[in-house]
Image (spheres, helix red, strand yellow):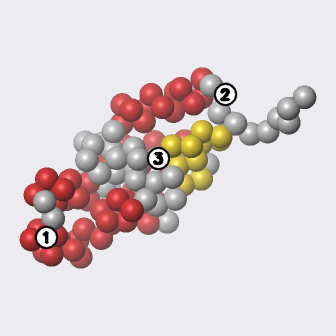
Amino acid sequence: MPASGPRIALLADVHGNLPALEAVLADARGAGATAIWNAGDCVGYGPFPRQCVELLREACDHSVIGNYDAKVLKFPRKRDKWSRSKQPLKFQAFEFAWQNLDRPSRDWLAG
């Protein structure tokens, strides 16, 4: 008889895509996941950075920061440099994500 234990759903690279995150969480719960682990890159590109962070804060048992999350948190310090060195659409994605995260969301990502 196989050992029973927690059924862990591992997710990553949400990148601000709230409809996809909601669908993945519903599927994981429907499949019997007893824990949700987040491997990072919660924000960026997609239009719902704050909403994704809020949902991940509620749903996940464990989370780590992704490289994209870390870059978004650095945006205020890197803005001038990145405005010259990043592709315009990538720069806009960093800027949008930063501007659409509230303090609790930024604190959670940094933690």
Q: Which residue is mark 3?
A: 12
Q: Tell me, yes or no, if residue 111 can be seen here.
A: yes
Residue at the image position 13 percent from the left and 60 percent from the top: 87
Question: What amino acid is labelled 3 in the image?
Answer: Ala
Residue 12 picture location, percent across and down: 46, 47
Residue at the image position 41 percent from the left and 47 percent from the top: 13
Q: Which of the numbered marks, if any, corresponds to residue 2?
A: none
Question: What amino acid is labelled 2 in the image?
Answer: Gly
Which quarter of the image is occupied by the N terminus?
top right
Contact, CB < 8 Å: mark 2 with mark 1?
no
- Ranked by sequence position, the earlier of labels 2 and 1 is 2
Side (left or right) of 64 relative to 101: right
Question: What amino acid is labelled 1 in the image?
Answer: Ser
Residue 81 location, quadrant: bottom left
Residue 105 picture location, percent across and down: 39, 56
Indicate the secondary structure of the residue bearing disc 1.
helix
- Ranked by sequence position, the earlier of labels 3 and 1 is 3
- Ranked by sequence position, the earlier of labels 2 and 3 is 3
Residue 91 picture location, percent across and down: 16, 60
Q: Which residue is mark 1?
A: 85
Q: Which of the numbered marks, if any, corresponds to residue 32?
A: 2
